[in-house]
Amino acid sequence: METIQVVFLTVLVFFVIVTIHEWGHYYFAKRAGILVREFAIGFGPKLFSIKRGETRFTLRLVPAGGFVRMAGEDPEIVDVSEGQTVALRVKDDKVTRIYLDRLDERSGVVRGEVTAIDLERDLFVSLDLDGEIERFRVHPQALMISKGKETQIAPIDRQFGSKSVGARAMAIFAGPMMNFILAFVLFAVCVQMAGVPKENPDKLFVGSITDKSPASGSDLKRGDTIFAVNGTPIGGNFKLMVDIINKSKDTAVKFDIIREGVKHSVNITPAFDKESQSYRVGISADPQTRPATFMETFTIAGKQMKVWTINIFEGFKKIITAQFKLSDIGGPVRTAQYTSQFAAEGIDKLTFWTAILSLYLGIFNLMPIPALDGSRLIFIGIEAVRGRPVNPNRESMVHFIGFALIMLLMVVVTFNDILLLVRGEQ
């Protein structure tokens, strides 16, 4: 596969699994009536920004996730206090814009000193206009302009905290949920692409070829039909092929193959594999398959979800019990490297890997780690039990510390990934 295509597919994988996650938050927040201020892919400085409706969609520099910023989750940045001089733009008897600076440059506005203001419940602002107090109604989607930046006001009924426990929990859980749905769909797609093994196969195909293995330097190609090994017909018997290779030890093994209807012979000398304590050539074999039925697709996809969920939790268990080395933990760089390798092997392998990544992202985000969705759901659960929310400032501090620690860990594992890459250990 062309390098440019591999790079494009690698970027696409990250974009899809992060976007589908954030879209889950976005959709259910909007459905609950929450004002979504920003839908961001990545963190750090903005690379691209466009506003559609009430939401600003941004692409940011650091491709380590994304976020959906909802009104009321954090303290609003712009504030107006009594005694402050502002300028109002009024349309149809309602304030549509509140200017906080550069007032002399504004035309067609009402300018005065604020005597009273409420932008959350009663939606009004009263100004002292040359000794006369005048009250103005404020449009629920009015904008506050300060230092060239527009911020839409958030009436209390548009804020995250004003919604029911169930609506807020759904808006948070929806991100991981969408990753689980995507993973299931992609596993199902893989089943449809690969099919299911035939009950009595009479053919065996070359699957993946391990890098730096004896087979990697041979003329074998993925998809070749293997019909005989050392002159022995093997049909669909993978175990028979493995036994013949292992018994050959350091002697070249002759593979009789068919590629695009033409017969070829390839000689490969096995190498001893310390892990399996056997001689191998470095290939996997794909069995002969048939198209999967609808029920088989559904069932096998579900089994894959179960198997890989167990594998992911086994990995978390090793981390919790410290059964790992720092070099075992990969960050964005190593994940991108593996993704590019799968992209080079074919769309079916990349689809399967994307399903695993999406499942992992969903599970990881539900972990009870500050700043992640799991932690936010715990705070909502505590509120449901005790009947009142946790102090917002304390909750924000917990999430801020958690986010800082996650970013620190990200820096460490990324440095480790780059170091291993430079040393050629990956």
Image: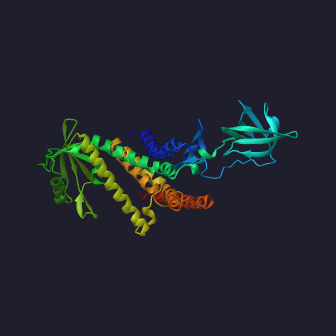
Image quadrant occupied by the C terminus: bottom left
Q: Residue at x 30, y 47 (%)?
A: 301
Give 305 or 286, whichever is nearer the viewer: 305
Q: Which residue is at a point 24% across and 44% down the rendered structure image?
A: 296
Most foreground residue, 326 or 231: 326
Residue 24: where, in percent of width, then height?
47, 45
The answer to which of 135 and 151 lies nearer the viewer is 135
Residue 67 picture location, percent across and down: 54, 48
Tell me: 283 left or right of 21: left
Count of labels in the image: 0
Pick the quarter of the image with the N terminus: top left
Residue 141 picture location, percent across and down: 65, 38
Would you say 84 lies left or right of 425 here? right
The reply to whether residue 342 is visible in this rendering is: yes
What colour scheme was applied to this rendering of the protein? Answer: rainbow
Front-lying residue, 289 or 182: 182
Q: Does residue 196 appear to the left or right of 163 in the view shown?
A: left
**For the view shown, which residue lies furthest in the left direction?**
232
**Is residue 139 shown left or right of residue 372?**
right
- Residue 318 position (above or below residue 176): below
Position above or below: 410 against 66: below
Residue 347, percent from left and from top: 35, 41
Q: Is residue 216 visible?
A: no
Residue located 21% across and 49% down the image: 267
